[in-house]
Amino acid sequence: MKQSVLIFLVLAVTSACSVTVKETFDKQTDFSQYKTYCWMAGCEFRVTGPDYLNDSIARENIRKAIETELKRKGLTIRTDNPDLLVGFTITVKDEQAIVYHRKEDSPFFIAPLELDKKIINYQKGSLIIGMADAKESRMVWQSHVSAYMETKPDLSEANINKGIKQALKNYPPKK
């Protein structure tokens, strides 16, 4: 009983951890000059990340989500002479938590302190979106979103849209 409650609490705490979003940008850059963009890899959309992202539906949902959010930010896609080059990558890292608990369920059980060990496997995922000035070939803005995730993450269109929206929330940056 205690073991299942403890596992539930650890999972609840890790799943309740909020998504962390960090942006870095060139403070000298005037972002109002950027009106167009293209994908970094020769203006071709490419997914870099775990194998399950090779699913054509997930790839298409990621592409559409980024393009929709950039359009909302005032940027249009343009393959010839774009202002910005946009790229992204997704990383997933397997991690473990070790939880110790008493062997007996009774809080009044008197015995030498003997603990059982439970290993909980989970994943930490990151989405990094970068924007480079196409003319100067230098990175001007980057967003790094990280969160704990399920072993088989929900790659629904709604979830992908939510993640991309969080990643691009503070673009263009306010000085």
Image (tube, grey):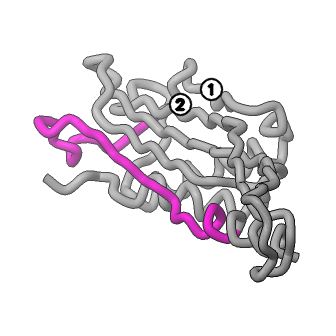
Q: Is residue 174 left or right of residue 142?
A: left
Splitting the image into 4 quarters, where does residue 29 fall? Answer: top left
> Which of the two residues, 81 or 73, is positioned nearer the viewer here?
73
Are the residues flagged by discs 1 and 2 in contact, CB closer than 8 Å?
Answer: yes
**Which numbered circle lies on residue 39?**
2
- Amino acid type at circle 1 is Glu
Residue with the mark numbered 1: 44
Q: What separation in Å lies between label 1 and label 2 (alpha carbons)?
A: 6 Å
- Amino acid type at circle 2 is Trp
Q: Residues within 10 Å of mark 1 (few under 14, many from 20)?
A: few
Indicate the secondary structure of the residue bearing disc 2.
Answer: strand
Splitting the image into 4 quarters, where does residue 153 fall? Answer: bottom right
| Residue 155 appears in the picture as rendered | no
- Residue at coordinates 49% horizontally, 41% vertically from top-left? 77
Residue 137, horizontal then vertical, whole percent: 32, 17
**Which numbered circle lies on residue 108?**
none
Residue 104, horizontal then vertical, whole percent: 86, 70
Q: Is residue 143 left or right of residue 3?
A: left
Looking at the rendering, the stretch of residues picked out in magenta corresponds to: 12-37
Q: Is residue 76 left or right of residue 101?
A: left
Q: Is residue 18 magenta?
A: yes
